[in-house]
Structures are given as C-alpha cells and as structure tokens.
Amino acid sequence: MHLPPGLAGLPWGDLDFLGWRDPGAPDRSYLVAPRGDGLVGVTLRVPQGVRRSFTKTTVCSVCVTGHPGSGVSLLAARRAGVLGRQGNTVGTYLCADLACSLYVRGRKRSQLAGRHEETLPLEERIARTVRNLDAFLDKVLEGEGEK
C-alpha cells in the first residue's frame, strides 16, 4: 500500500476520515476512519466494467458536494466476513479525491460553477458527512466476525 503523499502535513483537525487514491494503482483507493474505540481501514476499487469517466451522479453520497465531470467516482469495498470471501461488495459514490471533509468545511472547493450554498450550519454538515460514511461502513462491516 502506498501512503498518501504529504501525510505529516495533512490538516488532521479538519479530517473526519483519511482517504486517498493509490498513485501506483489509480483504480484503487483507501479509506481509514474512526470506528468505536479504534480505526477501520477499507480498500476501495472502481468496480470492474465501470468506466472511470462514467458516473450516474455528480454528487458525493458522503459529503453531498457536487462535482462536474469526473469529480465523483463509484467506488466499491469488499464486504467483511463470509460475504466478502464470496466476492460481495458494497459501492457508493465518493469525491474522486476522497477529500469530503475538506469540501464540507470549505477548505477545498468543487469546480462546479454556481455551487449551491447550504443553509445547514457547518456542525450539521459535518455530522451528516460522518453519518453517511458510517452508513456505508455499516454495510461493509455487516458480516464482520462471521466464519
């Protein structure tokens, strides 16, 4: 696994999770998020048969940020436990650069012209992002511990 470049200089206080694309394998990404008393790491892949330039949406399912063109990617994670060993995956649409936390906080801007401004306070947008990520991780980890 290739760690993200500039790891030490990341704005850790603004990250709800760490996500990065693998520079050595552009169809693979990684996501590490707090979960319970620890961390969970997930490998994400562009599903086979899905063209990178094609997505059905331009809005990230986690942070609800709109992106033009290929700014959103369909990414899939292998499910935990028996289901994962059987090859089952769970997919979601994510910011292609996995910088959801920075988009929500306004530290990074989508290049979408005329971006809609939300009326939700920042704390509620952050909480929504965390809830959406947790819902995705719940699906991934659903079979965890099963033999």
Image: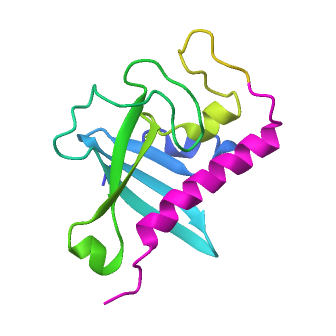
Residue at position x 57%, y 9% from top?
113
Residue at figure coordinates x 51%, y 36% from the top left: 60
Residue closest to the far front? 56
Q: What secondary structure is the magenta-colored segment mainly?
A: helix
Is 20 on the left-hand or right-hand side of 108? left
Q: Position of residue 95 (x, y in %)?
A: 47, 35
Quadrant of image for the C terminus: bottom left
Task: Decide if residue 13 is in sight here.
Answer: no
| Residue 93 image point, x, y percent | 43, 41
Quadrant of the rendered structure where residue 104 is? top right
> x%, y% of residue 19?
47, 47
At which x and y percent is residue 66? 54, 26
The span shown in magenta is 118-147
Residue at image position (75%, 27%) is: 118
The quarter of the picture where residue 39 lies is: bottom right
Does the stretch in magenta take in 145?
yes
1 in magenta: no
Looking at the rendering, in which quadrant would you find the N terminus? bottom left
Residue beneath the point at 28% across and 71% down: 84
